[in-house]
Amino acid sequence: MNIDRLEYLFNLYLNDSCTDMEREELFLLLKEQGAMDHIRASAPEFELDIKDMHRLDAATSSQILDAILKVQPADSSLRTKTPAGKVRIFNPLRYAVAAAAIILVSVGTYFWINASNPDAANGPIASPGPVPADIKPGKDRAILTLADGRQLDLDSATNGNLAVQGNIKIVKKDGVVTYIFEEAENADQLPIAYNTLTTPRGGQHRLELPDGTKVWLNSASSIRFPTKFNKEKRSVEASGELYFEVVSKEMENGADGTSTASEKLPFVVSIAGTQVEVLGTHFNINAYPQEGDVKTTLLEGSVRVKSANDQVLLSPGQQSRKAEDGALSVEKNVNTAQVIAWKNGEFNFQDTDIKTIMNRLSIWYDIDVQYKGKVPSKRFTSNISMNTNLSQMLEILRASGLGFSLEGRILTVHS
């Protein structure tokens, strides 16, 4: 059970600010073992007696209120500590009503889902259509291909030294692959070696490049880079979706390798016919073929995006899109939190169509998606933890009337 996610959704519910999908996700989390115990512990002023909740008839809502919620005398406010140490204040009566409402609606949802299966209270949750097998979410998985062709499975590699290439030591620490430059007399004479980090579907990974630049790779992505950058330009090649935190570097102009001017060393990403040139900045690139245009989103600093016949300069909060014909367009005031939600372990859907959602699920759960009938026109808005099994994700989507069936790793969407 994801405690942080449970608390986040519970607070959204208390403040009447959660979406329908977030509400359904909360109800599912509340059914997990230990969830209600945690809610009880977070609210010592209230005793929630929810034994045998699943056996109660949802129609007897007034009796359920009396049975499951006993409000004890309390002060005029309920104080709880947030992770950041701040005090959040809740009104006890509001808290009581909200807690009761959650349980009531949870019971109602349970019976709505199981209406066609009278024996479901004693077994697994059922829903319209075949119940899919469970598929676990993705995790940190990647293959590092060295210059000599050796491949290192980073999923099974332990922390510590992975390999040595010339005077470059490759180390894995806390799940991040790092390149450490070691001084050597003949360092400048050593040939430049190229490595490639590749994530499969259902995998993500983090990398620290030789210059200190940090890179996050989403599923089905790759980056090819030198083990040491040259003195004129830092260049990498990529595919899929990546988030960069590029460190600013001064160009080495002096004979002794030191900087004699304030000129910055460019960092260039080549991806899907697009070049993104930066000096020091934070940005996200999405070049998944199934999601259409190549999208570059700037969070901090500035970047110049170039295609074969066009170029644009981005400011923070802007996103460029490269169409198939190479034309570049710029969208302002982009929701950057939504763009990089994957980096923070969340699906962030804002009025998102089902096909885009299914594309995201396919790369994270390593499944293929097909549609029976027309592609549903429904759109969704929600934040959902990526640390969620596929079956739970589908239950959330089912609440809107969609149907799903799963055979092996082929998911069929029924409109």
Image (cartoon, rainbow, N blue to C red):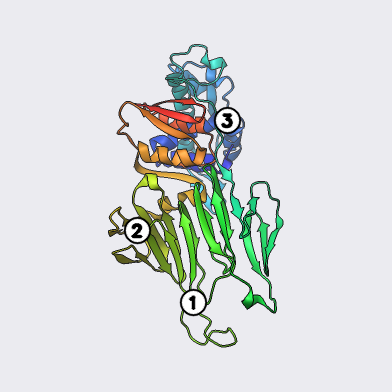
Q: Position of residue 95 (x, y in %)?
A: 48, 37
In the picture provided, is 63 more to the left or to the right than 41?
A: left
Up/down of 351 relative to 248, above or below: above
* Residue at horizontal 55 percent and vertical 87 percent from the top: 254
* Residue at horizontal 36 percent and vertical 64 percent from the top: 305
In the picture provided, is 273 more to the left or to the right than 205?
A: left
Look at label 1 and name its amino acid. Answer: Glu
The numbered dot on residue 232 is 1
Up/down of 324 relative to 261, above or below: above
Up/down of 255 relative to 9, above or below: below
Say which quarter of the image contains residue 304.
bottom left
Look at label 2 and name its amino acid. Answer: Gln
The numbered dot on residue 319 is 2
- In the rendered image, the residue lying farthest to the top is 118
Q: Position of residue 161 (x, y in %)?
A: 71, 59
State which tag comes first along the sequence, 3 or 2: 3
Query: In the structure shown, which secondary structural element does the residue marked by tag 1 occupy?
Result: loop
Q: Where is mark 3, residue-wise?
A: 32
Question: Mark 1 or 3, which is nearer the eye?
Answer: 1
Q: Quadrant of the N terminus?
A: top right
All told, the count of numbered labels is 3
State which tag comes first along the sequence, 1 or 3: 3
* Residue 162 visible to the viewer: yes
Look at label 3 and name its amino acid. Answer: Glu
Q: Position of residue 113 (x, y in %)?
A: 44, 21
